[in-house]
Amino acid sequence: MSLFHVIILAIVQGLAELLPVSSSAHVIVTEKLLGMDPAAPELTLLLVMLHTGTMFAVIVYFWQRWIRAFFQSAVDFKKFVVALILATALTGIIGVGLIEGIEKILLRNQPHAWVEQLFDRLDLIAVALAAVGVLILVAGLIKKASAAPDVPASELTNNQALWIGAVQGLCVPFRGFSRSGATISTGLLAGMPKVRAEDFSFALAVVLTPPAIAREAWRLIKTNHGQLGQLVHSAIEPSLLGAVFAFLAGLVALKWLSRWLEAGRWYWFGIYCLAAAAVVAFLYHSGY
């Protein structure tokens, strides 16, 4: 894995992770186009570090906004924490249930079955991209056509949090089904203001990312325990560099997303996802 490959993947991950276009789909396609194996252990370690970089980008970008939105009083903070807990709990129930079902039923005849074995399937990624593209397009167009005022200070309800958590759970096992695209769109369809939907979606991302990183790290240890020391020694420096580039690209992506969302251009991301689905389907039928 060359330095050039690391920088390219870090920029793709940093931009796509925080835009509603599915970072995993873009990273996997990029790896395949670069002639790399998405299942290789060194790429798994790199992905862990890239996720870490984008998580810190979210914290840096949203911290002051979260303080203004959710930390102005003890009551606001309590409502925010309850909403986070409800959404995350439902995400865990649905996401873990889907992963267990896939691993125990669909992959039951494979040794050491992990749902990640399906992540490089471009046909599945194309379907997921198309699905989230439709969701983003519908939510964006409905919000754009709505005559209701977009009041940033409106309260986040528990029902809205549960809907967002449920849809986030559907995103967990399916690469291409953008987490940010699905959760923000669900928030918009549930009547949330654009800024509040974005703030809450990325607060959930900070909660969800550490367990996702831990799962990737555990899978790396389980499948490469005999060569883990050598792998870490050889790949840790490029992975740290990748985290830095992913952090910087993530900050750029978040500014872009906020500007388009608040300007009523959210549905454009849906059009992009539908076009990306067509490209990925073409690559699949071309033998990638």
Image (cartoon, rainbow, N blue to C red):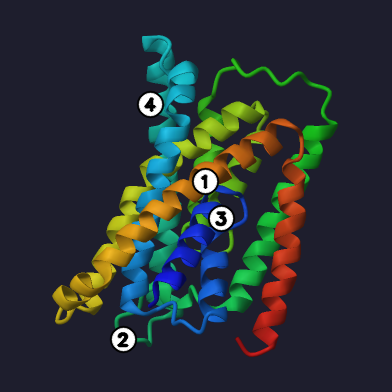
Q: Is residue 131 above or below residue 54?
A: below
Q: CA distance from mark 4 to mark 3?
A: 27 Å
Q: Is residue 92 visible?
A: no
| Badge 1 or badge 2: first in the primary sequence | 2
The residue singled out by tag 4 in the image is 81
| Badge 1 or badge 3: first in the primary sequence | 3
Quick one: label 1, few (<14), some, or many (20+) residues within 10 Å? many
Residue 166 is marked as 1
Under circle 2, the secondary element is loop
The residue mark sitting in front, 3 or 2, is 3
| Badge 2 or badge 4: first in the primary sequence | 4
Q: Is residue 59 visible?
A: yes
Q: Amino acid at mark 3?
A: Ala
182 left or right of 8 in image: right
x, y percent for residue 274:
74, 62
18 left or right of 218 in image: right
The residue singled out by tag 2 in the image is 111
The residue singled out by tag 3 in the image is 16
Under circle 3, the secondary element is helix
Give the total number of marks visible in the rendering: 4
Q: Is residue 1 above or below residue 199?
A: below
x, y percent for residue 172:
47, 57
x, y percent for residue 138:
77, 46
x, y percent for residue 109:
38, 87
Placement of the N terminus among the 4 image quadrants: bottom left
